[in-house]
Amino acid sequence: MRISSVVKYLQVFTVVILILSFSTEYTTHSKNSQLEYPLFSSALANSLQFNASNAYAHISSQLDFGFRVPGTANHSACADWIANQIYLSVDELLLHNFTIQKEEQPSYDCQNILGKLNTEKNNIIILASHWDSRNVAEKDTEDQNLPIPGANDGASGVGVLLELSRVLNLYKDFLDCEVWFLFLDAEDQGSSRGIYGLEGWDWAEGAKAFSEDIEDFKNDNEDVDCFILLDMVGGTYLEFIKESRSDTNLHEAIFEIGKDLGYSSAFPDNPTKMSIVDDHVYFDVIGIPVIDLIIDFINGDWIFHHTHEDNLDNIDIASLNITGRTIEEFFNQYYTVGDGKTWNDGDDLSTLNIIIISATVVIGVFVLNFVLRKRKR
Ligand code: 1BN
Ligand code: ZN
């Protein structure tokens, strides 16, 4: 056989190997999407501890304080309540006080609330939600300048986090991570449709302030693995989106767990893609893998965003259950002592495999080519 033919065969072989290695990665993904999901909760979901009735009661308690708008007595009373509640289930409670003062406007006292569980561990998972409620109802047809209850937009995430803190505290000795329960203030007072919640404020002011000071809250030997934001997780017709800044591996891991638990309508195969300014943005900016578990509040079926009807009537306890159990199972699968799994190595490993195989084959072709040419001479 002539040398040029051998080299040609090898080149074809290289292309075949490359195609095969890419298709291996593809089949890993498509296999998952061929699973059949049960219509209702699976046996696995039923074995979890998250109690959605507790989360619902926490939402109701927050609404009892009235509107949680910065600068009001309701706001500080609710902050104290959240701090007391989270303190029941964590090792350490830290308060991050900050002020917001926009030109010509008064200064507002704000507070992020941080509960730390398993402080002896060095890898941190941040579970976050905003706790303030919006001062205006710009999307309502009436009383646009009056505040909204924020049952879903604010209180739902807090309710789920408080219940998750109870559950994770139950089996904290089996978790090989530290968990931060982070309640962020001043998320919801930015401008929409030309109307500010509080004059001149940006969205996610509390997250920005905390991300700037995060080093004051952690030791040098600690690292944040990921940041999971729960925002509007308790409404009827729950259907999560793929937010553009959300880490792809983290998003896939959480969606796969949700589907495996039987929650395929909340975690659809082809989620709506959207870009949303929310608390997670500032944690992405400082290099932490993030996910924003949020609905399509613009074109989705939950139509009460920034209206007076964002109240308890439009909360669905099933949605709280879906969100809480999915996050609980995320800890079971990825942060249980001895499981050895991480949510962020799947695709990286496949990519590494492809690079190694490709490099080996290409180098092999060159070496063979070189040897055969030498022999010919
Ligand atoms: C998201 C949830 N946001 C507030 N609550 C931010 C936002 C609201 C961004 C409206 C764009 C439009
Ligand atoms: Zn909002």
Image (spheres, helix red, strand yellow):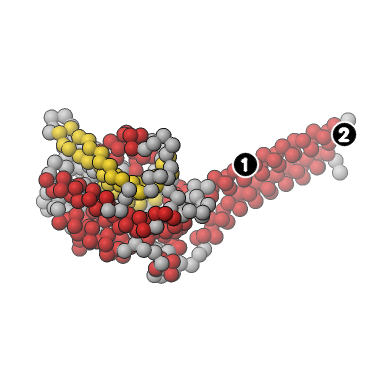
Secondary structure under the numbered disc 1 in the rendered image: helix
Q: Determine the image quadrant of residue 286.
A: top left
Instruction: From the top left corner, tell me how far across and down residue 124 is, in percent.
Output: 40, 44
Instruction: From the top left corner, tell me how far across and down residue 251 is, in percent.
Output: 43, 51
State left or right for residue 162 relative to residue 26: left
Task: Quickly name the residue at label 2.
Answer: 375
Of discs 1 and 2, which sits in the foreground?
Answer: 1
Q: Determine the image quadrant of residue 2.
A: top right
Secondary structure under the numbered disc 2 in the rendered image: helix
Instruction: From the top left corner, tell me how far across and down residue 202 is, in percent.
Output: 24, 38
What's the amino acid at mark 1? Ile
Quarter the C terminus occupies: top right
Between 159 and 307, the one lying in front of the other is 159
Q: Is residue 310 above or below residue 202?
A: below
Task: Quickly name the residue at label 1.
Answer: 355
Nearest to N terminus: mark 1 or mark 2? 1
